[in-house]
Amino acid sequence: MDVLSVPEERGRGWYLSLMAPNTKGSNFAWLDPSRLYCNHQAFSDCVKELLQPFQNESVDLVAGIDAMGFILGSAVATTLSKGFLAIRKAGHLCVPTESQPFSDYSGREKLMEVRNDVLRPGLRVLLVDQWIETGGTMRAAISLVEKLGATVVGVAAVAIENSEGGRWIKERYRYSHCIPEALQAQIDRQHLDSFHSFGN
């Protein structure tokens, strides 16, 4: 499918076939979900589907995780008419911060930080990232939010893989993703059938 095309019938997750496979090797994630953002209808439908489980939840603030979570998180915040908080990789914020170490999907040890003048007790936060593979990045973000006294209303991502970390999140927090049950096995084995026809 052409990246800008919109099908006449749009079932749940129709836009997932727009995601691009990794063609550059093991130093990169196994796919690039951000290609679906190029299609205005795909982007809009993705955000709507992510928000469905939270329709009856009170959300005060949306927090997105550096870096790709900024795109999806900003769109979610705008749709909800809420503010957006950036949770950053360490070393980019010029204000006092709270920090949290974590291991990313590649196993590299990193440090995440958030400004300490926004989150406070009683604030209800929806956490957004593009993809949850091992869960390490999202768990660090959860720790930061809760360390500063705020409440994690839920976790939203295009996909949550059924890794140990992904299951940990699903067992403890309200969550949403865009993956139909029939596609979850493909997500977990990190290869989509749609990749076979990619570029044709």
Image (cartoon, rainbow, N blue to C red):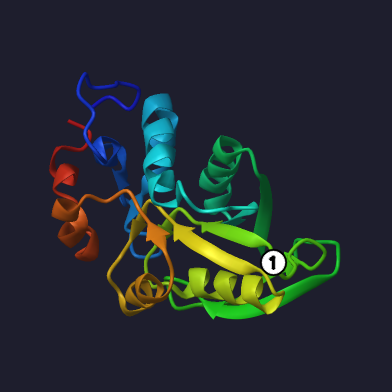
- Characterize the local packing of mark 1: few (<14), some (14-19) or many (20 or more) Cα atoms within 10 angstroms: few
Q: x, y (%) of residue 34?
A: 42, 43
Residue drawn where x is 73% and y is 65% of the image: 119
Does any portion of residue 141 appear in the rendered image? yes
Q: Quadrant of the C terminus?
A: top left
Q: Quadrant of the N terminus?
A: top left
Residue 44 quadrant: top left
Residue nearer the viewer, 197 or 102:
102
The residue under label 1 is which amino acid type? Gly
Left or right: 143, with 173 as reference point: right
Q: Is residue 129 above or below residue 9?
A: below
At mark 1, the secondary structure is loop
Residue nearer the viewer, 72 or 89:
72
Q: Is residue 46 above or below residue 155?
A: above
Residue drawn where x is 79% and y is 70% of the image: 97
Q: x, y (%) of residue 103?
A: 50, 78
Residue 77 quadrant: top right
Q: Is residue 180 above or below residue 168?
A: above
Does any portion of residue 109 appear in the rendered image? no
